[in-house]
Amino acid sequence: MKETIIKVNGMVCNGCENRVQNALKTIDGIENVVADHNKGIVTVTSREDVSKSVMEEKIEDIGFDVIKD
């Protein structure tokens, strides 16, 4: 398992957190997702073969901006 931290701009409430969490959980290999709108981050636990770019694309598809390092 690996843990990935993704910085997200635009999450302003618990509803936003839920949208991001539910979207990411549809990706095969994602085990757990915790979004925190106060910190602007999403912490994802997944199998090693799930790429960060796939997660970022899913977040952007539902209308949030990913802040890339």
Image (cartoon, grey):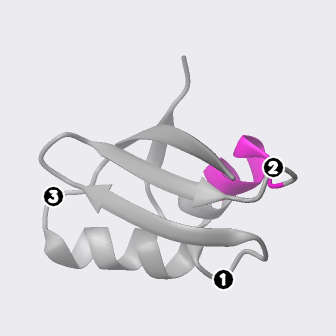
Residue at image x 76%, y 70%?
A: 29
Name the residue: 80% across, 47% down.
51
Helix, strand or loop at label 1? It is loop
In-front residue for pair 30/14: 30
Can you tell which quarter of the image residue 21 is in? bottom left
Query: Crowding at label 1, few (<14), some or many (≥20) Cα neighbours within 10 Å?
Result: few
Q: Is residue 67 left or right of residue 39?
A: right
Residue 56 lies in the magenta stretch:
yes
Measuring from the top left, give residue 45's x and y in whole percent. Answer: 56, 57
Kindly give the residue lying farthest to the right in the view shown.
49
Q: Secondary structure at mark 2?
A: loop
| Image coords of residue 12 (percent x, y) | 15, 58
* Placement of 49 over or under 27, stated as above or below: above
Residue, x 19% and y 53% (percent of image)? 37
- Graded by Cα atoms within 10 Å as few (under 14), some (14 to 19) or many (20 or more), the crowding at tag 2 reads few
Q: Residues within 10 Å of mark 3 (few under 14, many from 20)?
A: few
Q: List the residue tagged with mark 2.
A: 48
User: Which labelled disc corresponds to residue 12?
Assistant: 3
Q: Which numbered marker is on residue 26?
A: 1
- Stretch of the chain drawn in magenta: 50-57
Give the CA distance from mark 3 to mark 2.
30 Å
Residue 44 inside the magenta-drawn segment: no
